[in-house]
Amino acid sequence: MSEIVPSAAVEEETAVLAEHLARAAEREAAMRASRFWRLRDAWIRLKQRLGLMGRDPLAPGATSNALAPAYRTVSYKLWLARHGVRPADLERMAATLPLFRSRPLISIVVPVCDPEPAYLQALVDSIDAQIYPDWELCLADDASTNPEIARLLAGFAQQARVKLHRRTKRGGISSASNDALGLASGSFVVMVDHDDCLAPHALYEIAFLLQGQPALDIIYSDEDKIDEAGTRFDPYFKPDWSPETLLSKMFAGHLLCYRRELLIAAGGFRSAFDGSQDYDALLRISEQTDRIAHLPSVLYHWRVHRGSTASSLSAKPYTVDAAVRAVREALERRGVPAVVERDASGAFVHVVPQVRGTPRVAVIVPTRDKAELLDRALASVLQLSSYPDVEVIVVDNGSVEAETAALLNSWHDREPQRLRVVRDDRPFNYSALNNAAARSSDAPFLLLLNNDVEALERNWLAVLLGWVQQDGIGAAGGLLLYPDGLVQHAGVILGINGVAEHAYRSTPSNLMGYFGGLQTVTNYSAVTGACLMTRRDVFESVGGLDESLPVAWNDIDYCLKLRRAGHRIVYVPDAKMIHHESATRGLPQTESARRTHAKEVEEMRERWKIAEMDDPYYHRALTLTASNFGLRL
């Protein structure tokens, strides 16, 4: 059920919800200002440092049924009141149907196995309510034992647009899905579970998208959850196509539409992956086509009830095991050696590509004094890191302290083959310093590294290299933490604070993030230059860092140039570091520094048209006033 809001009630409901939201914000502000809350924050930080903090139970996308009421939030109700589809919207959509150049038949494929009868009826009702009329419903009953299901299916089969196949022996969800697929005659098929619901404009949106992009092979949409009372909550506003994110989780999920001939040619669904058969199919089919599109609209309502994976993965733990096997087999097909296993939460897939060969990595560290910080950064590369073939280029930009000279001499005496110091006393220009150092080396991989970071894991450099070696990856960055353990960087979101902001800044690093995004490998538009691995060939092909951006945004500009050239960017949480941000240079304090910063902001906004740009990896429904993936209200 799509909860269409009657036009006459929208403004009144919006006002009431806005008032509730304002009062809730006031209560939250007062609570966070209290002495109790300050002590609570200190206790959480202490527990996190000691490794005692578990998974965040209130993260969006958490799968505990007991927490479902927490997601029936005022903010989503308010968002729906303001942005939800209304009867007038549906009427306008229906009025455009005669203008369509083509009206493809869409086959809705549904495997059925003893669902709650009321939920199956609700699904069919939601299909009957579609404003796009060119559809057929293909049902395959996997030997359901409830006589009420048999009665319902017999009634549905009397309708002209419904096809029914009955299995006499239970074969599992893949077998039933393939049987239903065998009934389909449409150009496109939409996969739907037997207890979920479609929004009334779901098929219309697919057909409308195909008017302008008829060659598309795969289409997926946003989704939310719906409880037993019909209340919608926990929306998942998804990124555009993200191949590396897909290796961590089946983010495309629902609503998922395939070109029928492509799905059949790929062999349909495989019983060995029951529970994650849709994940396995998408991994296989996306290897055959890049004509994939995201419909940024909530078109699917995933039913939450006892025993469903929407309520808890523990209800069907085999689904994650099947997901791990699907990803492992996908990487084997692609010739990518990798460790593939469940992640620490047990809900996602953890992938670590293995480094091919031992290519040299040039680690470029611009510095000016601050010997104590620099010592930690050099130790992270030369002592802690397990990767052996590195060339550390320290670019000394105007150091004057004796401690710095002594430290560099000491490190060079210990590592004469792996460390060299280049003195460059030009006025500070981060881009120029890195570009000059890159030209002085012939290493095939470059790692831009601030002098104020220190690694926390031995494999940090190797995991970044393993990802950057993958086809299509232009740059990779890690998880950077403030000294108190809060997140400083976990990918970069465009549009926040005028240009860009680090995802999850100042949140506890043990949280799962938006549908697991803090703890899983994720595609982003950019990563920070404080720890950025890239390939020399792509670095040179886009002209390196832009020297007209001497202080800030040069890393974001570089990543955007990579994306424009067709390369992808990945955030890799396994590369975990402490970042003493701006400890060397400091934040802009003088009037001159502030003018430079303002000039760079304006340059970035004009160059990339930031105000007009939608970040493909950050949904337009999400806020631009913070980097916490809240709703844009």
Image (cartoon, rainbow, N blue to C red):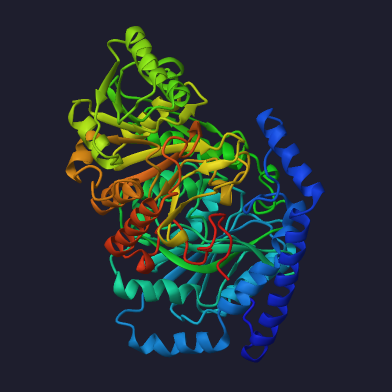
**Is 210 situated left or right of 505 in this image?**
left
**Can you give x and y, in whole percent of width and height, for residue 223 in the image?**
55, 63
Residue 234, given in percent of the width and then of the height, sits at 64, 60
Which quadrant of the figure contains the C terminus? bottom right
Residue 430, given in percent of the width and then of the height, sits at 30, 40
* In the foreground, 92 or 161: 92
- Point 26% across, 54% down: residue: 564
For this orientation, the residue located farthest to the right is: 36
Q: Is residue 43 above or below residue 263?
A: above
Compared with 356, 331 (above or below) is below
Q: Quadrant of residue 148?
A: bottom right
Q: Is residue 381 left or right of residue 517?
A: left
**Which residue is found at the position 73% from the left and 39% from the top?**
42
Q: Is residue 60 visible?
A: yes
Q: Please state if 68 lies on the left or on the right of 302 as rendered.
A: right
In the image shown, does 272 or 7 lie closer to the viewer? 7
The residue lying toward the viewer, choosing from 590 and 53, is 590
Res 369 → quadrant: top left
Which picture quadrant has residue 128?
bottom right
When the figure is inspected, residue 324 is found, relative to residue 594, above or below; the finding is above
Which image quarter is the N terminus in? Answer: bottom right
Q: Residue at x 44, y 74 (%)?
A: 205
Q: How many marks?
A: 0
> Is residue 105 visible in the rendered structure shown here?
no
Residue 395 spot, x, y in % from top left: 29, 28
